[in-house]
Image: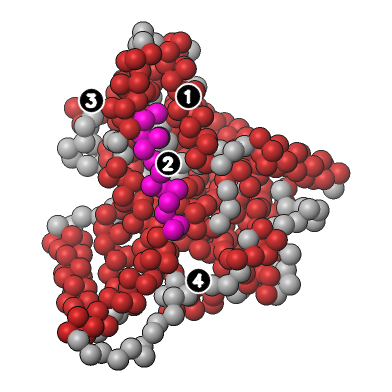
Amino acid sequence: MTEVNEKKRLTDHFTIFAEKWVPDSYVIALVLTVLAYGLALIFTDEGPYKLVQDWGKGFWSLLTFAMQMVLIVVTGYALATTPLCQKLLVKLCSKPTSVTQVYVWGMVLSGIAYYLNWGFGLVFAALVTKELAIQAHNKGIQVDYRVLCGATWTMFFIWHMGLSGSAPLLVATPDHFMVKEMGVIPVSQTIFSSYNLILTIASVIIIMFMFTVVIPSNKNIKTMADLRPDLMQPAVVDADDSIEIKTPSQWMTHTPWCTYIVVIMFAVYLFYHFVALGKSLDINVLNFMFLLLIMFLYKTPAKFLKGVKAATPASWGVIIQFPFYAGIFGIMKYSGLVDIFAQWIISFSTPESFPAIAAILSNVIGYFIPSGGSKWAIEAPFLIPAGQALGVPDAKTVIAYMFGCDWVALIQPFFAVPFIAVAGLEFKDFVGYTFIVYIVLGIFMLLGLTFVPF
């Protein structure tokens, strides 16, 4: 018992440190911009003026991804605020009857969502977190909302090992950019390999143990009512059916017929995508599905627009922060700083240590370039040849990259921006807890990548 109390005091120490010293996510993006610029100035041959050009060259390179994420946040939030979905969410989150059950239920639901699709999971996990906190408050269960957010966010660690993992899905396509160097690697050797499944299951167990046994404390509890009392009521958009239709424009705005025609078009396209083309789910198709659902559930354009307007404020963090991370990407890529980092770490690798070192490298670079897909395009050209030279199977290198890529998300707020926008807290409010798990999980992950048989 004493050991657990010591660990609890340690988590409290990190939480206090984070609340005092860790700024909000936008400021972190600015600090990382300055840091990346300084490192490139020191370690590369690029001059100050050229580095600014590199920064500007990358600044707008994530606009497509940013818009995709804005739509994920807005459509996901709007979907959850429909009366039907709100009832389902309340029913789903009303099951727990104790503090531990709230944490476990939150991690299970968010983990499933992240595993199925990371984009959907970002919004769904935040909405589940909010509703669990509301239900706990209504039952008189004292749940620390910061810990609950930390628990549900930390489950994001498994997204790349799941069904929407960027790198494993990319290398499984016949025409991926590294096909000449490594061929096509089916998901049976990456996502569904015993190596990946064992490490993923072990990671989930560690996360759940940390947030049910080690981290929770009876001291200094701050509930959602303490931190964000304005979020205590479900954000349901009420429908106004009392309007008297007098003009053609009012008829088109307050009747569902045009909506239903477009919904049918959405459904036909999804049939074409999944059945005729045989393609899988991606973030664009996910947004297609969200749009279809919210249009169908809101029925009229007037109700749809009201729901979307209510959801739009949750996306401001994505809009303003993603370009700054794209600028960091530009500095890292075009100055050659990423190659310097890579060669330095790979220089002391062995066949046994390479997967763990590759994960560490992915983790370090991921703090500056937090993107699972585009970062793979930067790392793959030197990770794959290095692994091959050491006799490491390409699939094992891909899995090592996957774990390192997700590991850094526990302390890097880039992907958390949609989550914190919906959940209503700042990253600094719960990063003290996720940092503890980052250390513990990282140790077990690196040991697993080294010693678990492939």
Q: Give the secondary structure at mark 1.
A: helix
| Badge 3 or badge 4: first in the primary sequence | 3
Q: Position of residue 29 (x, y in %)?
A: 48, 35
Q: Residue furthest top?
A: 45
Task: Kindly identify the amino acid type of the residue bearing the numbered disc 1.
Answer: Val
Q: What span is in magenta?
A: 313-328
Give me the residue at 17% from left, 84% from top. 248
236 or 134, which is in the foreground? Answer: 236
Q: Give the secondary structure at mark 3.
A: helix
Q: Which residue is mark 2?
A: 321
Instruction: Identify the colour scheme used.
Output: secondary structure
Q: Which residue is mark 4?
A: 235
Label 4, residues with CA under 10 Å away: few <14, some 14-19, many ≥20:
some
| Badge 4 or badge 2: first in the primary sequence | 4
Asked if residue 120 shows in the view, the reply is no
Q: Which residue is mark 1?
A: 34
Residue 270 located within the stretch drawn in magenta: no
Picture quarter with the C terminus: top left
Asked if residue 240 shows in the view, the reply is yes
Label 1, residues with CA under 10 Å away: few <14, some 14-19, many ≥20:
few
Q: Which residue is mark 3?
A: 181
> Could you tell me how far apart the alpha carbons at marks 4 and 1 are, in whole angstroms?
38 Å
Label 2, residues with CA under 10 Å away: few <14, some 14-19, many ≥20:
some
> Could you tell me how far apart the alpha carbons at marks 3 and 4 are, in whole angstroms?
51 Å
Task: Kindly identify the amino acid type of the residue bearing the numbered disc 4.
Answer: Ala
Q: Position of residue 193 (x, y in %)?
A: 40, 43
Marks 4/2 in contact by CB < 8 Å: the verdict is no
Task: Kindly identify the amino acid type of the residue bearing the numbered disc 2.
Answer: Gln
Q: Position of residue 398 (x, y in %)?
A: 37, 34
